[in-house]
Image: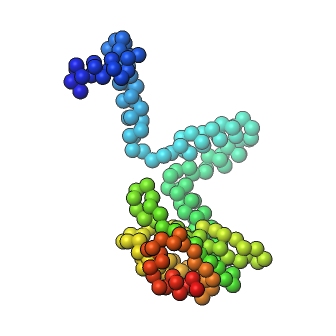
Amino acid sequence: MKPYQLKQHLTTVHPEHSKNDRAFFELKETGLKKCTIGGKNKKPHTIGDTLIKPCILECARIVLNKDAISKLEQISMLNDTIKSRIVDMSNNIKHQIITKIQASPMFAIQLDESTDVANLSQLMVFARYMNGPTIEEEFLFCKPLETTTKAEDVMAVVSTFFGDMNLNWKNIVGVCSDGAPAILGSPIWFYLAC
C-alpha cells in the first residue's frame, strides 16, 4: 500500500494502534518474521529426537539406574526409523485382517469414493466378516482413483486388491455403496450385490 493508504487503513480498521509509534510496528514486524522463519525451516519433524527422548532420559536419570538410561539411549527416534515402524505396524494389521477374512466363510464390503484435501479421489473399503461366533467390521484399504471415478475404475481397484490379497470373490455376500450413479453404473456390481 501507498503511505497515505496505509495510514487510512490503520486509522479506520485498527484505530487502537493508530497512536503507536514506529518502534512498536518494527517490533511487531521482527516478531512476525521470526515466526515465519521457524515455520519454513524445511527440516523434518524431529520432535521425538529433540524433545521427547531427552525428557524420557531425564526422567529415567531421576527414577531409574544407569543401565536403564543406557538402554533408553539406544532407542532411535529418527524420522526414517519411526516411519518404518509405522509401515510395519500397518502391514501387520492388514495381514491380520486379511487372514481373518480368508478364514471367514463369507464377508461383505462397503465402499465409498471421497475427495481428499488435495482434490484427489480416494476409494475407501470396509469389510464385515465372521470371526468365530462374532461379526467384525474393519477398515480394509484406501487407494487413490488415479483416472476417473467411474464404476469400472472402482471395480478395477477392488479387483486388483482382491487379487493381490488372495481374497475370493465367491465369498462375498454383499456390496454396499452410497448409491452414487458412478458406482451403480457397472453391471458387475449389480451381479455381486444379487
Residue 42 sits above or below residue 178 on the image:
above
Residue 181 sits above or below residue 76 on the image:
below
Q: Is residue 1 left or right of residue 29?
A: left
Looking at the picture, tell me which residue is in the foreground, 182 or 120: 182
Q: Residue at x 54, y 41 (%)?
A: 50
Quadrant holding the C terminus = bottom right
Q: Is residue 110 visible?
A: yes
Q: Residue at x 57, y 39 (%)?
A: 51
Q: Quadrant location of residue 111?
A: bottom right
Looking at the picture, tell me which residue is in the foreground, 64 or 37: 37
Question: x, y percentage for residue 132?
Answer: 76, 77
Quadrant holding the N terminus = top left
User: In the current view of this chain or complex, which residue is farthest to the right?
Assistant: 133
Question: x, y percentage for residue 58?
Answer: 66, 36
Q: Quadrant location of residue 4?
A: top left
Q: Quadrant location of residue 105?
A: bottom right
Q: Residue at x 62, y 46 (%)?
A: 73
Q: Is residue 179 left or right of residue 102?
A: left
Question: x, y percentage for residue 112?
Answer: 52, 68
Q: Is residue 58 left or right of residue 37?
A: right
Q: Is residue 157 visible?
A: no
Looking at the picture, tell me which residue is in the foreground, 185 or 155: 185
Q: Residue at x 65, y 47 (%)?
A: 72
Question: x, y percentage for residue 180?
Answer: 48, 71
Q: How is the image coloured?
A: rainbow
The total of numbered circles placed on residues is 0
